[in-house]
């Protein structure tokens, strides 16, 4: 949430900052700003709207600001509405210092009151402005260096932050710090330094990065280099890592939108998530990342799965998988509810935390809670080196590659793939699955990427269906068993990017409420492949038909019964019931995509949403 970028070095800062902001825009896009320092003067430009509005404004005002030090920000509003004044960077009273910030300063109210009494005047509604005034106050009254002022101020704040401070009195330095919100420093050649809230703006400049830990402060000096301290004033040794991220992965690669590219990447991202882990030919599944913890799974009396949004939906599929295959009771929890509920957690619980970004604040806090009660924490994350994998005992990455579209697609199928591998691995170790079913599932799983390709071939038909329903105000998504979470995910995708109200429901529950909504205007999307609950769902379809609802059904190839009742059917290849979500979700992703495009919505950056939710 909110994108941060900073540069100090030998090149012009502005082009680096703007291209960095464009890459980070998926994190938040309600306002943007930059500040550049040259010859002891700071020039700040900021405005409501997208990075393109900022660029246009700067171009209209006379072109690129010059200077080799600068900071930039793209905002997702927390305190104060999106407008020019609340946009970052924020400045101290005398304008000598500017700062960008991601996170929330929780005690900003009391700090603001105190600073107001001491004569500070605030222009914006933001918590960020309070922090830069606090730093300024300390700097002047205690007569300390900028680093020391930042350090003392950070000892006074409660909350989460990733900040970069630029001071015209120390033009060769940027000070960066973090707690709870991610921050990474890229170390280029020739004393070029890049700072960002994730590695995406850095990868085109350097592969060498240092991820800051909580309460660390980086002093980045154009002459003296990079020094790492913490808020207790202890020097730390930076751990320089090499980024594996490839630049092409951050480009649209000929697709109109990132979301469409990411939907089409799924045969590959599912394969990458299985690579080296699934050996159908050898009859083996192994996840190296959790090997040392496999006995904890085997002896667990319970698994708790934590996540938010789409990751929570993947967790629901995980519940079906672990209960079905490994015979371990599972609870799937919204991380945001779990953390505030005084939950009962046992030392022999295994907690699986699922997160694409690895940065979701609620998931991170729920992990810390479960860890403090002695549970074993396993992560399933996509972003390597992010905060959640670092907070867990062990885990397995999804290897879906960067997901830029705000609506999650390939991350979901990669999460379900890893959950499937995990459940199979545990089931095998535990002896809860028969040899024949285990081997059959390995072969089926191995064939999934090819079957996803086949589903993607239905794109034109799905687009045609989208055209039929693009103007509806409401939609219902129904599924049973393994496909109930898919119904939820299908509804979420439609809401997120096309702003059509949609509900996902277990099909049999329709009778207990949603059936009242059905009339000839209501499209009902049934996820109805062959499998255990097939006959039951056929009855549910009949119930909708009897009330003149429009029926769009996802069915297994060759199926006739539903076809005779439905207005539209989308056929998918057959597979084992427990792998079906990997196929049935694809048409729903494509459908939402096409509906959103036809409605003229911003598919990759839907209103009010952000890709990585680093605030509560
Ligand atoms: C945001 C995103 C969703 C995502 C959710 C959880 O709401 O817009 O797409 O599912 O956060 O994010 P995570 O990174 O933890 O999977």
Image (spheres, rainbow, N blue to C red):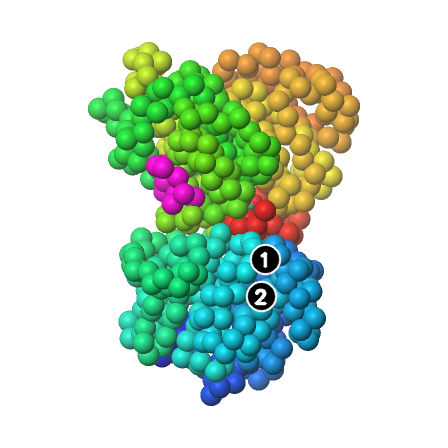
The residue lying at 67 percent from left, 59 percent from top is 109
Report the front residue among 467 and 100. 100
Residue 125 position (above or below residue 572): below
If the image is split into quadrants, where does the N terminus sit? bottom right
Q: Single out the residue that lies furthest toward the bottom.
A: 39
The residue lying at 56 percent from left, 55 percent from top is 158
The residue lying at 49 percent from left, 27 percent from top is 345
Q: Is residue 395 magenta?
A: yes
Instruction: Give the extent of the magenta segment.
Output: 388-399
Q: Give the x, y percent position of residue 382.
A: 41, 44
Residue 600 position (above or below residue 144): above
Q: Give the x, y percent position of residue 609.
A: 60, 50
Q: Is residue 303 magenta?
A: no
Q: Earlier in the sequence, mark 1 or mark 2?
A: 1
- Asked if residue 604 shows in the view, the reply is no
The secondary structure type at the circle numbered 2 is: helix
Q: Is residue 277 left or right of residue 229?
A: left
Q: CA distance from mark 1 to mark 2?
A: 8 Å
Q: Give the x, y percent position of residue 328.
A: 43, 18
Q: Would you say the residues marked 1 and 2 are in contact, meaning their CB atoms lie under 8 Å apart?
A: yes
Q: Give the x, y percent position of residue 278.
A: 29, 29
Residue 375: mark: none
Q: Name the residue beneath numbered marker 2.
A: 131
Q: Name the residue beneath numbered marker 1.
A: 105
- Asked if residue 390 shows in the view, the reply is yes
């Amino acid at each position: 949430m909110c994108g941060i970028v900073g540069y100090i070095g030998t090149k012009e800062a502005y082009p680096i900052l703007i291209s960095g902001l464009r890459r980070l825009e998926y994190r938040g896009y309600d306002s943007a700003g930059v500040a550049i320092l040259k010859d002891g003067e700071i020039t700040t430009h900021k405005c409501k709207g997208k990075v393109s509005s900022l660029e246009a404004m700067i171009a209209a005002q006379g072109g690129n600001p010059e200077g080799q030090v600068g900071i930039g920000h793209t905002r997702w509003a927390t305190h104060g509405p999106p407008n020019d004044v609340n946009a970052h960077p924020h400045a101290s009273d005398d304008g000598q210092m500017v700062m960008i910030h991601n996170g929330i300063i929780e005690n900003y109210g009391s700090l603001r009151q105190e600073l107001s009494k001491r004569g500070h005047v605030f222009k914006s509604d933001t918590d960020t402005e309070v922090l830069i005034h606090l730093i300024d106050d300390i700097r002047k009254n205690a007569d300390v260096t900028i680093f020391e002022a930042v350090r003392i101020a950070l000892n006074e704040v409660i909350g989460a932050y990733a900040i970069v401070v630029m001071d015209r009195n120390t033009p060769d330095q940027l000070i960066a710090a973090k707690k709870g919100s991610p921050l990474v420093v890229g170390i280029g050649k020739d004393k070029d330094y890049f700072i960002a809230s994730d590695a995406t703006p850095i990868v085109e400049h350097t592969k060498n990065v240092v991820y800051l830990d909580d309460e660390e402060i980086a002093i980045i000096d154009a002459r003296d280099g990079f020094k790492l301290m913490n808020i207790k004033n202890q020097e730390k040794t930076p751990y320089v890592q090499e980024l594996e991220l490839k630049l092409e992965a951050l480009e649209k690669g000929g697709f109109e939108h990132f979301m469409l590219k990411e939907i089409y990447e799924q045969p590959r991202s599912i394969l990458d998530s299985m690579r080296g882990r699934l050996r159908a030919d050898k009859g083996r599944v192994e996840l190296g990342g959790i090997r040392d913890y496999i006995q904890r799974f085997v002896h667990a009396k319970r698994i708790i799965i934590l996540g938010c949004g789409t990751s929570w939906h993947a967790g629901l599929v995980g519940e079906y998988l672990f209960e079905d295959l490994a015979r371990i009771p599972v609870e799937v929890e919204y991380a945001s509810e779990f953390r505030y509920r005084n939950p009962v957690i046992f030392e022999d619980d295994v907690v699986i935390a699922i997160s694409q970004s690895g940065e979701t604040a609620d998931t991170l806090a729920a992990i810390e809670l479960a860890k403090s009660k002695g549970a074993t924490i396993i992560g399933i994350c996509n972003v390597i080196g992010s905060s959640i994998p670092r907070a867990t005992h062990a885990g397995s990455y999804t290897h879906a590659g960067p997901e830029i579209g705000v609506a999650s697609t390939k991350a979901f199928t990669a999460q379900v793939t890893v959950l499937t591998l995990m459940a199979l691995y545990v089931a095998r170790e535990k002896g809860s699955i028969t040899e024949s079913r285990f081997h059959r599932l390995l072969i089926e799983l191995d064939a999934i990427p090819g079957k996803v390709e086949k589903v993607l071939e239905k794109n034109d038909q799905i687009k045609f269906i989208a055209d039929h329903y693009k103007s509806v105000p409401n939609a219902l998504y129904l599924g049973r068993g393994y496909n109930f979470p898919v119904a939820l995910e299908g509804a979420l995708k439609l809401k997120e990017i096309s702003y059509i109200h949609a509900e996902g429901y277990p099909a049999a529950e329709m009778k207990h409420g949603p059936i009242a909504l059905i009339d000839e205007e209501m499209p009902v999307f049934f996820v109805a492949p062959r499998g255990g609950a097939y006959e039951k769902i056929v009855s549910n379809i009949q119930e909708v038909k009897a009330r003149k609802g429009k029926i769009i059904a996802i069915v297994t190839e060759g199926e006739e019964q539903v076809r005779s009742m439905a207005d539209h059917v989308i056929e998918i290849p057959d597979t084992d019931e427990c792998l079906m979500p990997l196929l049935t979700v694809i048409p729903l992703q494509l459908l939402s995509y096409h509906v959103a495009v036809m409605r003229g919505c911003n598919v990759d950056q839907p209103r009010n949403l952000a890709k990585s939710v680093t605030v509560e």
